[in-house]
Structures are given as structure tokens and as C-alpha cells.
């Protein structure tokens, strides 16, 4: 199986790595870079537990090959908080108890950050649509939606590491 | 189906030039697969339905992601344009809102950043959300590959009208050695309007249980209007409900012809029972969605 040399920027840090053809971006993040915040849920692009930002846009990293991410800028949940300082969105999640088991949370945060970047004042329906690809088995979504609404109302988006691409 | 994070072993090749692709496909035959967004391919590979040894990424070929509109020629969408790119493109929204709506109905926002127009059409699923709109807007799928008409061994381009493209579940008019480069749409008729109504097990994000597209415009028919009706997920291919369309061309638009047309559309559907719905439910929903879509399109046109 062919190996590929790729250059990838993850949470602001550039790496050069050799990857086999069949390694997914999710596996690269978790297994090669020890960024285990991003989770594997369904391996089919349906649950969103693996959602990260690639060049500023949310994607299911289980559905992207590492080699396809050559030259890309990646932001994972670890890249949201700035040196331990939670983003207003993350603080809203804490304030609203929008986290139970936490498994969906990294993907939800990424999708929610991306939503407010492209639509700073979403309606409740727009929030729901934006999070359709992030399944949560614990919370029933209510507090997640409220947290995103609070973050939107506060008008402050995120830390600078979010990726302005 | 186990949620194994990894993929089976294969070689990834990124095509650098268009004419490399037919050569690679012919060299490797069944062992090669084209890669667009990967949102169908990787799922089937993980499930063991297909086991390619070589995966040819064609997304980066020149023009594959371009979307452009010309007032004379119409709309061209590169095969690698993503669903989100199609849905939010100002020219698609302005001139082909039915297509924007259809592209926007696929899965979720992150998945739409990878799923492509080409993949959605060439995967040949009867449930493909962009297929009914492509049929109704008279799309022509552009294929590049070995050109049987020249017999000079040169590769060339050919166009397949959408209503000749879908042949069965997973089967399209693509020949071995071919790849799709774009889909082209003519300029739509003046005064046209369209809706795509997709029914899933939830309000958004699911595959279609039934998808109904309606496209209407003023025309020189008996009724003064023409309606086109496209159905997804209710037959072995995405299809047009031709008898329903003919009925609507003959009677002025109104609740009664719409209801009759919805019945005809239901008759055109030949769905199956599957995990998402029964055939009987799908048929009933075709009627309900067709009626609703006709009313909404007519309201937009008046």
C-alpha cells in the first residue's frame, strides 16, 4: 500500500507526516497526533462525533483520508480554547449543563462554532439544522440549543485559534 | 455493520491530468474506483461491499469544482462541486433554486462539505436528492473517457441527458473508463418555480423515504402552464411522473387537476419495503408530497 508524505497544520502547529493511503484524518488526529478529543462514533459520516474544521469548514473526519488533508488547516476541539481559557461558546455549554457524557460535545462545539462564524444570529431552527449531523444520546439537545443561543446573544465568537480560513 | 474507524487497505492516487484517468481505470479495471467526496465510497468499503485496490481522486482536476452561469449557455456544475457549494452559489440560488434546495437537503452541513454533485448522480442511488431536480431542469451529464464514436483510441467528452442516465439501483449510463466532469443545465424557462419536498424519518438529515420535486413554468400548452414532476426513492431509478405531467398540461392549474396529478404520480411510483418505510407508505406519501409541492409551486408562479 502506498505511503504519502503530507504537510498538515493542526491547531496552528504544522506537521509533516508519512501516512498510508487508507489512514483517515480521524485516525491521524487520534492515533498519530494524540488528539483524542475528536471521537469515532459511526465511521459512516452520520453521527458527527468526528467533526473537525478543515480549512474553516466542518467535516466528518472519518470520511476524509489523511492524504486528502495534505496542505489543509485543521482545527479540533483542543484548538478552540486558548491556553485553558474557554471560548464563550464552551462557557455557555458549561453554564447550561449542555454536556452529559461528553462524547458528542467536541463535534457539537466544532459545528456550533462554524455556525456562528457563518451566521452570527441564527434562529432556533437554523441552530437545529446546523447540528443535524451531530447526534446526542444524552441531552435531548435542548440545553445544547440554549447554549448556542446564549453564545450567539453574547455576540462574542471564539478564540483566535478557531481558524479564519 | 461495525463502526470500525479504519478502512481496508488500498492505494490512493491523485489524478493530475484528465487523460490519466481513463488509462488508470482501464489498467486496473474492477480494482479501481473513482473518489469524489468519499461519502458513499468509504461507507461501502467499510461494509465490505466493494474492495478497490486503487482509489483515484479526481477532485483536483481543472474545472471539477467550478460552478458558473452564462445567460446564453446556462449553468455548468463541476462534478466535484460540493452540495454546500451548489446550495449557496448565488447563480444557483437565483436561477435554479430547485437545485439549491435539493442540494441543501442532503444529510448534514458537514457531510455536504464533502458530498459532491458528481458523486450524488454517479452513485446511481434511486434516493439521490439532486436527481429529481437534475431531471426536471433537463441536466446533461458530461462524461469523459474512451470515445467509441472516433475509434481512434482518443478520449473525448460526451453528454448524456439526465433522463437517459439512471438505469437501475447503482447503475448509470457511465461506461468503463469514464468519469463525470460536469453537469450542464439549460437556461430555465421564464417565470419558472420549483420545490423539492423530502420526507425522512426526521425533519432533516435522513435519506429520503420519498422525495418529490415539482418544477412549473408558463408554456404554450392547453393549460398555459407546464409542470414537471420528479420522484426519488420510490422506484428503481429517480424518475419523472410523465402521465401526471401530461394531465397538468391539459387542464388549467387548480386543486382538482393537482389532486388528479398527485394520484397519477403515485401510480408512477414503484417503491419497495425497506428499513426506512413500507412501499404502501411511500406510495401514499408521493401523492401527499406531489399535491403539496404543486400547490406551493403554483403559489410562487401566480
Image (cartoon, rainbow, N blue to C red):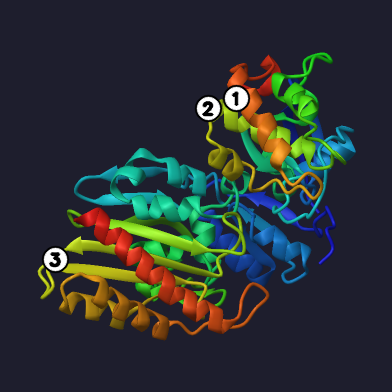
Q: Is residue B164 visible?
A: yes
Q: Is B300 positioned to the left or the right of A73 in the image?
A: left
* Chain identifier of the residue bearing label 1 in the image: A
Mark 1 is surrounded, within 10 Å at the Cα level, by few (under 14), some (14 to 19) or many (20 or more) other residues, namely many
Instruction: Tell me where residue B264 sits by quadrant.
Output: bottom left
Q: Residue at x 48, y 47 (%)?
A: B81
* Chain identifier of the residue bearing label 2 in the image: A
Q: Nearer the viewer, mark 1 or mark 3?
A: 1
Q: Residue at x 36, y 64 (%)?
A: B293
Relative height, residue A5 to residue B57 (above, below): above
Q: Nearer the viewer, mark 3 or mark 2?
A: 2
Residue under numbered circle 1? A152
Relative height, residue B5 to residue A19 (above, below): below
Cα distance in 3D space between marks 3 and 2 = 42 Å
* Sequence-earlier tag: 2 or 1: 2
Residue under numbered circle 2? A121
Q: Residue at x 76, y 42 (%)?
A: A25
Q: B51 or A92, which lies in front?
A: A92
Mark 2 is surrounded, within 10 Å at the Cα level, by few (under 14), some (14 to 19) or many (20 or more) other residues, namely some
Q: Please state, as top left, top right, bottom left or bottom right, where the C terminus of chain A lies in the image.
A: top right
Q: Residue at x 78, y 44 (%)?
A: A139
Which disc, if any, is residue B43? none
Residue B6 in picture, x, y percent from top left = 83, 54
Labels 3, 2: one chain: no
Q: Is B273 positioned to the left or the right of B263 in the image?
A: right
Question: Do labels 3 and 2 touch, CB within 8 Å?
Answer: no
Residue B193 in picture, x, y percent from top left = 27, 56
Helix, strand or loop at mark 2: loop
Residue under numbered circle 3? B219
Cα distance in 3D space between marks 2 and 1 = 6 Å
Amino acid at each position: 500500500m502506498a505511503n504519502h508524505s503530507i504537510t498538515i497544520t493542526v491547531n496552528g502547529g504544522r506537521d509533516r507526516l508519512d501516512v498510508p493511503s487508507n489512514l483517515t484524518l480521524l485516525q491521524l488526529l487520534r492515533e498519530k497526533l494524540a488528539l483524542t478529543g475528536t471521537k469515532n462514533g459511526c465511521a459512516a459520516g452520520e453521527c458527527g462525533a468526528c467533526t473537525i474544521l478543515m480549512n474553516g469548514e466542518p467535516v466528518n473526519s472519518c470520511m476524509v483520508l489523511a492524504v486528502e488533508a495534505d496542505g489543509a488547516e485543521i482545527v479540533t476541539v483542543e484548538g478552540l480554547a486558548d491556553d485553558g481559557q474557554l471560548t464563550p461558546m464552551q462557557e455557555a455549554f458549561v453554564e447550561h449543563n449542555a454536556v452529559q457524557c461528553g462524547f458528542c460535545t467536541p463535534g457539537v462545539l466544532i459545528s456550533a462554532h462554524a455556525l456562528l462564524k457563518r451566521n452570527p444570529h441564527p434562529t432556533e431552527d437554523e441552530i437545529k439544522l446546523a447540528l443535524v449531523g451531530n447526534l446526542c444520546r444524552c441531552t435531548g439537545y435542548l440545553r445544547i440549543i440554549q447554549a448556542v443561543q446564549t453564545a450567539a446573544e453574547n455576540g462574542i465568537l471564539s478564540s483566535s485559534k478557531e481558524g479564519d480560513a | 455493520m461495525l463502526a470500525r474507524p479504519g478502512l481496508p487497505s488500498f492505494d490512493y492516487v491523485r489524478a493530475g491530468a484528465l487523460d490519466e484517468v481513463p488509462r488508470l481505470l482501464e489498467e486496473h479495471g474492477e480494482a479501481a474506483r473513482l473518489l469524489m467526496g468519499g461519502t458513499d465510497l468509504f461507507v461501502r468499503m467499510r461494509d465490505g461491499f466493494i474492495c478497490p485496490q486503487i482509489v483515484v481522486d479526481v477532485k483536483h482536476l481543472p474545472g471539477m469544482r467550478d460552478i458558473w452561469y452564462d445567460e446564453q449557455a446556462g449553468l455548468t456544475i463541476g462534478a466535484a462541486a460540493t452540495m454546500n457549494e451548489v446550495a449557496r452559489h448565488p447563480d444557483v440560488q437565483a436561477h435554479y433554486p430547485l437545485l439549491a434546495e435539493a442540494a441543501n437537503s442532503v444529510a448534514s452541513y458537514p457531510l455536504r462539505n464533502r458530498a459532491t454533485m458528481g458523486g450524488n448522480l454517479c452513485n446511481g442511488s434511486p434516493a439521490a436528492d439532486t436527481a429529481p431536480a437534475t431531471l426536471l431542469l433537463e441536466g446533461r451529464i458530461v462524461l469523459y473517457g474512451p470515445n467509441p464514436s472516433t475509434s481512434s483510441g482518443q478520449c473525448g467528452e460526451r453528454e448524456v441527458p439526465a433522463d437517459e442516465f439512471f438505469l437501475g439501483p447503482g447503475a448509470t449510463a457511465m461506461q468503463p473508463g469514464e468519469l463525470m466532469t460536469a453537469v450542464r443545465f439549460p437556461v430555465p424557462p421564464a417565470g419558472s418555480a420549483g420545490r423539492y419536498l423530502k420526507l425522512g424519518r426526521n425533519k432533516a438529515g435522513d435519506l429520503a423515504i420519498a422525495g418529490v420535486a415539482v418544477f412549473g413554468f408558463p408554456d404554450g400548452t392547453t393549460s398555459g402552464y407546464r409542470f414537471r414532476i420528479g420522484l426519488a426513492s420510490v422506484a428503481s431509478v429517480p424518475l419523472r411522473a410523465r402521465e401526471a405531467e401530461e394531465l397538468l398540461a391539459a387542464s388549467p392549474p387548480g386543486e382538482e387537476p393537482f389532486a388528479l396529478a398527485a394520484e397519477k404520480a403515485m401510480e408512477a411510483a414503484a417503491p419497495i419495503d425497506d428499513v426506512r418505510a413500507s412501499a404502501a407508505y411511500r406510495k401514499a406519501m408521493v401523492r401527499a408530497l406531489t399535491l403539496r409541492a404543486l400547490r406551493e409551486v403554483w403559489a410562487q408562479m401566480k
